[in-house]
Amino acid sequence: MKKLLACAVALALSASAAVAQDLLPIKIGAAGAVDHAPVFVGVERGIFAEHGLDAEVVMYQSGVDMVNGLLNGAQDVNVMGSVPYLTGLARGFPLVLIAHLHGDPNRDAYSDNQSIIASAASGVGEGDIAALEGRRIGLPRGTGAEGFLLGVLGSAGMGEDDVELVNIPPAELVTALNQGDVDAVAIWQPWGATAVTQVEGAVLVQAGGCPECYDPGTILTTQSVIADNPETLERFMAAFAEAQAWVRANNDAAAEINMRWIQGVELETMALALSSVSLDPRISTYTADMYQAKTLPFLVGLGRIDETFDPSDAIDTRFLAAAEASNPDAFEDLAPIPADRQAY
């Protein structure tokens, strides 16, 4: 009996080792943003492992740092905003968009996860963008939050020179607003909802609704990762789409998982913030078209890049297409994309 038991244990250990050896390693760059929930869910619920991946999350403060990490090989994929991606392409970085972290493939404007919040002392009221003139506004520079703020200011006939921009990491913005270090903040979720709920008298000046903004979340990799590890990326995209679908169907449970990865946010606030994000990975023709029509000209106007360009060569839909083909259930609750807007 002892020999049989020993054999059984040995076989179990051998099987476990074999499974572990079959797992492909992948490092994922993420940040303390509510829409990064599919990454955290994919790890905690074992979705990445089920798809044959040994996933490790590398946390960052902003997309700018995340791009640097990706280029330096610290991770294989990033989930982040569009502005650092496009700025990087303009500088010749070998970045490739393989799917969206969040967005809407059927809309030509997108800024749903961004907001501007002002302190009570600032005197800025709801919807009163003009009152931001001359105010100190905290935000992480070079990110989608800056693009959103300046897009909103532009719609009111104002620009960067009409306000004082203060570079502050996302997790420190609520404290800065509460202490009066700034008059307002511009940031993505959950920090926007956190500022509204934790800063006494805080005013939600505007949430999304920027017609000139196109800033869907991105899932990025590099040309070298695609060349060297296509199977890893195929498994990742299938797992990520499944994790997104789970978050869409389980908002409150996903918010609880987020709580273990994002500090300083109350559960109710996290759930509220998560419910405002459109977790849709699909790429339509709007992606390349609206980058060229809205996001890139905006960055040129700010002097962030020299000229517009067609980003189509830096968009690769093969892994997304494979995920839709292998697991259509992960996409069945999403609105169909019209034939004339399908990109793959």
Image (cartoon, rainbow, N blue to C red):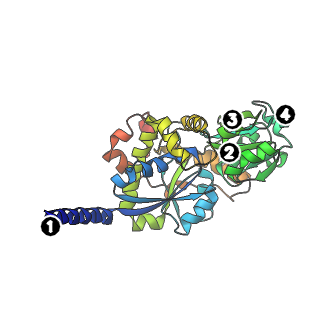
Please report the residue visible at 46 percent of the width from the left and 45 percent of the height from the top: 281
Q: Give the residue at mark 3.
A: 197
Residue 272 at x, y percent in the picture: 58, 34
- Crowd around label 1: few <14 · some 14–19 · many ≥20 (10 Å): few
Q: Nearer the viewer, residue 310 or 158?
A: 158
How far apart are the two marked residues, 4 and 3, measured between alpha carbons?
18 Å
- Camera-side mark, 2 or 3: 3
124, 190: nearer the viewer:
190
- Label 4 SS: loop
* Mark 4 closeness class: few <14, some 14–19, many ≥20 residues within 10 Å: few
Within 10 Å of disc 3 (Cα), the crowding (few <14, some 14-19, many 20+) is: some
Residue beneath disc 1: 3
From this viewpoint, which residue is outermost toward the top?
126
Q: Position of residue 171 (x, y in %)?
A: 67, 50
Label 2 vs 1, first from the N-terminus: 1
Q: Find disc 4 in the rendering and name its residue.
A: 123
Rendered view: 6 above or below 213: below
Q: Nearer the viewer, mark 2 or mark 1?
A: 1
If the image is split into quadrants, where does the N terminus sit?
bottom left
- Per the model, the C-alpha gap separating discs 1 and 3 is 63 Å
Q: Name the residue under label 2.
A: 187
Q: Is residue 128 above or below residue 318?
A: above
Tell me the element at label 2. Answer: strand
Q: Which of marks 1 and 4 is nearer the N terminus?
A: 1
Q: Distance between the residues labelled 1 and 4?
A: 79 Å
Question: In the image, 302: left or right of 86?
Answer: right
> Could you tell me if residue 181 is visible in this image?
yes
Mark 2–mark 4 distance (CA, rounded to whole Å): 19 Å
Residue at position x 45%, y 65% in the image: 225
Q: Is residue 264 left or right of residue 243?
A: right
**Mark 1 or mark 3: which is in front?**
1
Residue type at tag 3: Thr
